[in-house]
Image (tube, rainbow, N blue to C red):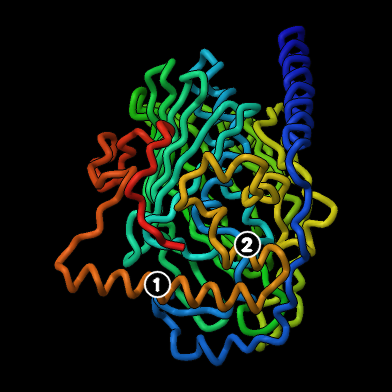
């Protein structure tokens, strides 16, 4: 009984500490802007069906979409949102137990896609050679990314701890497909996290993402698929199942999985919602809870809502996770700013990614996303100028590609080189270093 009381008290104290950590995250952004210069545009007057009706089942990277369906961020800035909850990596670095480190890494992997909740705007496709950098001293990291390929579109990124604790890197090339009512993003690319102090390396890929009701009805997002996080140093593995919505919507946003050691023994269960929070619990307690839950479900009859042939109605969302007794909180999502709904559903972190702070012009590479005139115009509320600038930039990129072909020249990346991920053996874009030396000579004029 005394030991159970000790465990209970330990979990309560840890919960309080985590809550305080989450609260402190909201203060991190206090010296950055908290809103955009202008609210988002209405998309109700745009007929997307006239554009997409011939694209069912096809890959959409080569399809030009109306700019009203964009959000004022480049895809390079969107993948930077992985770093919003960097404190979870820092926590993993500080833990002495490998399983607790895996729990923190798993929470980080889920939190990295949490910003996509209700984000139905499409980020701008990066131009070839486009870059983005972000340094957050208060969160302890700096990041650089580069668009290393245009067809197929590939974005490479490299983030590192300012104190030398971790390196986080990867190359992402999502494939978008239109299926009549929805657009699905297939998560191509490997993500690698190295905890240098512990000589540990973790790899994983993101889940599928689907935006429903592209043609008619309210847009809504679900993520689904299996994410396997492998600790290549210990052989431990975390298997996370991002559950699809299902017929009655009961599984919407749910994530369930487990951590196993190299002998495949389950050590703990992880559960929650990628839109809300993640918890860990002992496998036996989880199974006992599930059996009890099944008994309760048998007593209830499921009543299906009226079907709609024109749109896939978003199921009612159960906003809270049923917490199993004895569980430990791993992560809880931060609240969004009050004006988020009229500003592309941006988080606090996303709201300041395109901010051009005083003095930045003299420091940033001329290829940085913040200098893109189409994104800047859209952020400022001038959609006509944004559309014109987007067309101009795309035409300039096509002309540059034709000129290279005419002169039999190959495109050369600046900050990343194509190589092999030493942990997975798969093709990957590896950071070659030197970006923060600020030698930006001979960079292409892409804007």
Residue visible at 73% across and 37% down in the picture: 29
Q: Looking at this rendering, what residue extends furthest in the left direction? A: 408
The picture places residue 77, in percent across and down from the top left corner, at 55, 51
Residue visible at 64% across and 67% down in the picture: 377
Quarter of the image with the N terminus is top right
Q: Quadrant of residue 236?
A: top left
Label 1 sits on residue:
396
Q: Looking at this rendering, what residue extends furthest in the right direction? A: 338
* Mark positioned earlier in the residue sequence (2 or 1): 2
The picture places residue 237, in percent across and down from the top left corner, at 42, 34
**Helix, strand or loop status at disc 2:** helix
* 129, 151: nearer the viewer: 129
Q: Quadrant of residue 287?
A: top right
Residue 447 visible in the displayed image: yes
* 319, 41: nearer the viewer: 41
Q: Quadrant of residue 41?
A: bottom right
**Helix, strand or loop status at disc 1:** helix
The picture places residue 250, in percent across and down from the top left corner, at 69, 60
Looking at the rendered structure, which numbered label has been put on residue 447? Answer: none
* 398, 204: nearer the viewer: 398
Label 2 sits on residue:
376
The picture places residue 177, in percent across and down from the top left corner, at 45, 73
* 16, 249: nearer the viewer: 16
């Amino acid at each position: 009984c005394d030991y159970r009381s000790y465990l209970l008290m330990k979990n309560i104290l840890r919960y309080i500490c985590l809550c305080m950590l989450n609260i402190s995250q909201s203060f991190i952004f206090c010296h950055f802007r908290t809103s955009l210069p202008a609210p988002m545009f209405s998309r109700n007057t745009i007929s997307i069906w006239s554009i997409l009706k011939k694209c069912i089942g096809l890959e959409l990277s080569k399809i030009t979409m109306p700019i009203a369906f964009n959000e004022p961020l480049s895809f390079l800035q969107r993948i930077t949102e992985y770093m919003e909850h960097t404190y979870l990596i820092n926590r993993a670095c500080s833990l002495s137990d490998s399983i607790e480190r895996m729990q923190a890494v798993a929470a980080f992997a889920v939190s990295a896609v949490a910003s996509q909740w209700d984000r139905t705007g499409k980020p701008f496709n990066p131009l070839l050679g486009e870059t983005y950098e972000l340094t957050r001293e208060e969160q302890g990291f700096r990041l650089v990314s580069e668009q290393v390929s245009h067809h197929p579109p590939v974005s490479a990124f490299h983030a590192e701890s300012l104190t030398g604790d971790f390196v986080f890197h990867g190359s992402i090339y999502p494939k978008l497909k239109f299926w009549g009512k929805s657009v699905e993003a297939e998560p191509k690319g490997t993500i690698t996290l190295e905890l240098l102090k512990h000589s540990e390396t973790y790899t994983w890929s993101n889940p599928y993402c689907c935006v429903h009701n592209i043609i008619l009805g309210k847009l809504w997002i679900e993520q689904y698929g299996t994410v396997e996080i492998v600790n290549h140093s210990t052989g431990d593995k975390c298997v996370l199942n991002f559950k699809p919505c299902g017929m009655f919507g009961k599984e919407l946003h749910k994530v369930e999985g487990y951590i196993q050691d190299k002998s495949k023994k389950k050590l703990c269960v992880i559960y929650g919602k990628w839109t809300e929070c993640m918890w860990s619990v002992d496998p036996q307690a989880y199974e006992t809870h599930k059996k009890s839950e099944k008994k309760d479900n048998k007593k209830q009859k499921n009543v299906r809502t009226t079907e709609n042939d024109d749109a896939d109605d978003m199921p009612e969302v159960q906003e809270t996770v049923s917490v199993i007794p004895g569980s430990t909180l791993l992560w809880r999502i931060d609240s969004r700013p009050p004006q988020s709904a009229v500003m592309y559903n941006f988080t606090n972190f996303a709201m300041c990614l395109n901010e051009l702070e005083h003095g930045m012009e003299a420091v940033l590479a001329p290829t940085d996303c913040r200098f893109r005139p189409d994104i800047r115009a859209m952020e400022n509320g001038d959609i006509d100028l944004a559309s014109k600038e987007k067309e101009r930039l795309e035409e300039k990129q096509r002309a540059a590609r034709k000129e290279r072909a005419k002169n039999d020249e190959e495109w050369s990346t600046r900050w990343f080189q194509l190589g092999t991920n030493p942990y997975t053996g798969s093709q990957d874009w590896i950071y070659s270093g030197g970006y923060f030396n600020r030698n930006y000579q001979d960079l292409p004029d892409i804007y």
